[in-house]
Image (cartoon, rainbow, N blue to C red):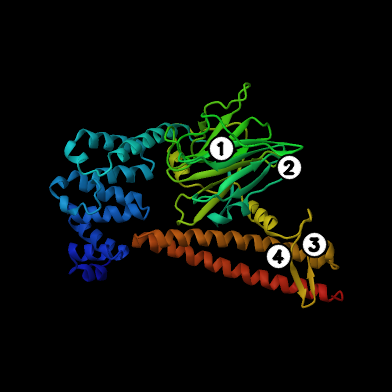
């Protein structure tokens, strides 16, 4: 902490921090709590509130540091600080859970359950069992993390999810439908041959389930509920089936073998027409957040899935990855494995897979050729390469398209970093993120200037040919 900041905070008290906390001024409150906690590490109140704020803003490492101090202190005599009705040990276990330290979650929850005094501080005892179950699942997954090459990512509004997913006769066709009293989109998968479909539908009071329907000359048959192996008492949604007609992917909130929220599962169809018990496909696809909508383009060897991990409420990030039928796992002792599962890195080279899909899905043209809208002058707009009359102009135009793709990628990176900056309360981390934003914005501005200059050159070359 700088000398000037120390002077500024020297007169601030716990009560000042609590007042800011009550007014939801969390960043200012955290500065006060951390200044007190850093100088007086045994101050339970400061560490408690600092831990809560860091946990709620996804700064799990710092949350763990503060909450460990609280747990190690005499917090049972400080019931007045438990403003949210939560046990400090339960909060610590939650921070460990989101930080992928699942063995530590199990240890803390076992200690919690062994203490009647601590359990008395937990308002919902079922939440302890639920978190224990998820941590046990995560602890098993940690030793079997799949190596995956990620090619691209894009952040979209949840209601625009389908804009970045491909559909054709090789993959199948995905659409959404809305039902009354169901907040989420319910997905429908239709096979590439359009001879069957799998539908997510509301099933009375047990949430959403998956149904199967065949197409006959007379139309679609009445939907039939898939087997209990697939459907649970919780929500199932986002179905997709490989071209073999046997392998089903879907997302489920089922209680068993679930890491948290929606997890992606895979199930095979047996010879008797029933599905086998679904298998959780594990990390890095699944996380403590919601993970869903996995589809595979077997022709192009590209898979896609969506997740809301580290995303604002109405946003989701879609990843494209290199699909292979066989799995390669990280070594159980490989320290990079957990980091890889927590922080997906685009490591397949610079591609624009998802950007291209979005362009294709949002165009009104039905042409299978590469189409675009490029204004040459106030009366002329080009839509395809064959419109060009100057070969040099066409070459420059393709260079311009490549630049526009780079600019789009930078826009997505900027959006992601700005979201992290907005959600981060640590002033030093914010400073680092601010530097990344400044550097990226500078690169974005330079590329935009270059693209504008190139577009102008293309127009001049074409006008020189009489356009």
Label 4's element? Answer: helix
Residue depth check, mark 1 versus mark 2: number of the one nearer the observer: 1
Residue situated in front as seen by the camera: 162 or 436: 162
Residue 303 in view (yes/no):
no
State the residue position of label 4: 400
State the residue position of label 3: 384
Give me the C-alpha separation between circle 3 and circle 4: 14 Å
Residue depth check, mark 2 versus mark 4: number of the one nearer the observer: 2
Q: Earlier in the sequence, mark 2 or mark 4?
A: 2
Pointer 2 local density, CA inside 10 Å: few below 14, some 14–19, many at least 20: few
The percent coordinates of residue 90 (x first, y second) are 27, 43
Which quarter of the image is occupied by the N terminus?
A: bottom left
Residue depth check, mark 3 versus mark 1: number of the one nearer the observer: 1
Residue 170 in view (yes/no):
yes
Is 192 left, or right, of 434 in this rendering? right
Task: Place residue 393 in its image quadrant.
Answer: bottom right
Label 3's element? Answer: loop
Instruction: Using the image, determine if residue 21 lies above or below residue 232.
Output: below
Q: Earlier in the sequence, mark 3 or mark 1?
A: 1
Label 2's element? Answer: loop
The image's mark for residue 169 is 2
Q: Earlier in the sequence, mark 1 or mark 2?
A: 2
């Amino acid at each position: 902490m700088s000398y000037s900041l120390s002077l500024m905070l020297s007169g601030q008290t716990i009560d000042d921090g609590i007042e800011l906390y009550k007014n939801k001024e969390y960043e200012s409150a955290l500065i006060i709590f951390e200044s007190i906690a850093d100088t007086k590490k045994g101050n339970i109140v400061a560490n408690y509130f600092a831990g809560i704020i860091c946990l709620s803003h996804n700064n799990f490492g710092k949350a763990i540091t503060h909450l460990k101090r609280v747990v190690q202190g005499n917090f049972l005599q400080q019931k007045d600080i438990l403003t949210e009705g939560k046990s400090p040990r339960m909060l610590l276990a939650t921070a460990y859970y989101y930080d992928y330290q699942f063995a530590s979650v199990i240890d803390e929850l076992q200690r919690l359950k062994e203490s009647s005094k601590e359990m008395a501080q937990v308002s919902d005892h079922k939440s302890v069992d639920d978190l224990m179950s998820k941590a046990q699942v995560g602890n098993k997954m940690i030793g079997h993390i799949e190596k995956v090459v990620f090619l691209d990512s894009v952040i979209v509004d949840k209601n625009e999810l389908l804009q970045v997913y491909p559909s054709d006769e090789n993959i199948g066709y995905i659409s959404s439908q809305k039902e009354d009293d169901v907040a989420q989109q319910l997905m429908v998968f239709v096979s590439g041959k359009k001879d069957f479909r799998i539908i997510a539908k509301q099933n009375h009071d047990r949430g959403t389930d998956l149904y199967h329907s065949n197409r006959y000359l007379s139309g679609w048959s009445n939907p039939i509920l898939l087997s209990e192996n697939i459907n649970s008492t919780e929500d199932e949604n986002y179905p997709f089936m490989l071209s073999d007609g046997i392998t089903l992917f879907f997302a489920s909130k089922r209680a068993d073998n679930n890491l948290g929220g929606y997890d992606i599962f895979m199930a095979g169809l047996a010879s008797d027409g029933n599905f086998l018990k679904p298998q959780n496909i594990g990390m890095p696809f699944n996380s403590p957040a919601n993970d869903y909508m996995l589809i595979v383009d077997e022709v192009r060897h590209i898979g896609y899935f969506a997740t809301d991990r580290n995303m604002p409420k109405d946003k989701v990030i879609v990843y494209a990855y290199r699909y292979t039928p066989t799995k390669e796992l990280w070594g159980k002792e490989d320290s990079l494995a957990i980091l890889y599962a927590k922080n997906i890195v685009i490591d397949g080279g610079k591609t624009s897979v998802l950007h291209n899909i979005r362009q294709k899905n949002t165009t009104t043209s039905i042409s299978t050729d590469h189409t675009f809208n490029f204004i040459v002058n106030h009366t002329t707009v080009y839509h395809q390469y064959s419109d060009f009359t100057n070969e040099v102009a066409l070459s420059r135009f393709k260079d311009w398209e490549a630049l526009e793709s780079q600019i789009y990628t930078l826009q997505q990176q900027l959006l992601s970093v700005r979201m992290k900056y907005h959600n981060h309360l640590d002033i030093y981390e914010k400073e680092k993120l601010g530097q990344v934003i400044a550097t990226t914005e500078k690169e974005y501005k330079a590329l935009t200037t270059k693209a504008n200059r190139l577009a102008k050159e293309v127009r001049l070359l074409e006008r020189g040919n009489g356009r």
